[in-house]
Image: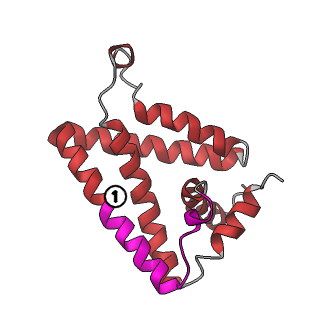
Amino acid sequence: MSRTISNWLAEYGTSHQNPTNKLIHWFAVPGIYWSIVALLWTIPTPAFMAELAWLNWSTLALLIIVGFYVRLSIPLTVGMVAITVLCYLIAYGIESAIGTMGLLITAVVVFVVLWIFQFVGHNIEGKRPSFFKDIQFLMIGPAWVMAFLFRKLGWKY
């Protein structure tokens, strides 16, 4: 049986009921998403990719992620692509300011620190992170935050 976006979000939400855990996730999930975009951004690209400024490992990963989201929700896919573009702009700005190594170090620090917060949140919640059950929940986390924003704005997903 294939899951709908509502099924995914509901199941993800069962381990995100505690207000402190939810608050941590609303900040940590987008930050971790950015850090992954930035980490992928810093991987050297082969010559055929380097000829196109926009083509890097992060862009290729986005294509896979879009494929996952598009079968679940077109509006959330559009939202996630918009957030990813914002992540690209931030990564580009940081790289322009402090270089690729600076971006890499920043992304690693953000990734590690925010995952620590995530595990603290789940400790408070008293439930294991959803991705221990199914690795695909790593992609549902950002959609969960995006769905929250959609609901706040009165948009359907």
Does dot 1 land on a helix, a strand or a loop?
Answer: helix
x and y, in percent, of residue 82 in the image: 52, 44
Q: Is 117 in front, or is 154?
A: 117
Magenta stretch, main secondary structure, is: helix
Range of residues picked out in magenta: 112-134
The image's colouring method is secondary structure
Q: Residue furthest left?
A: 98
Q: Is residue 136 above or below residue 91?
A: below
x and y, in percent, of residue 71 in the image: 73, 43
Q: Residue sitting at 42 percent across and 36 percent down?
A: 58
Position of residue 80 in the picture relative to residue 110 (left or right)? right
Q: Which part of the image, by quadrant, shows the C terminus?
A: bottom right
Q: How many marks?
A: 1
Position of residue 60 in the picture relative to residue 66 (left or right)? left
Please state which amino acid type lies under the numbered disc 1: Phe
Asked if residue 56 shows in the view, the reply is yes
Q: Residue sitting at 48 percent across and 68 percent down?
A: 26
Q: Is residue 126 above or below residue 44?
A: below
Q: What residue is shown with label 1?
A: 111
Asked if residue 97 shows in the view, the reply is no
Q: Is 104 in front, or is 133?
A: 133
Q: Residue sitting at 35 percent across and 22 percent down?
A: 53
Q: Residue furthest right?
A: 1
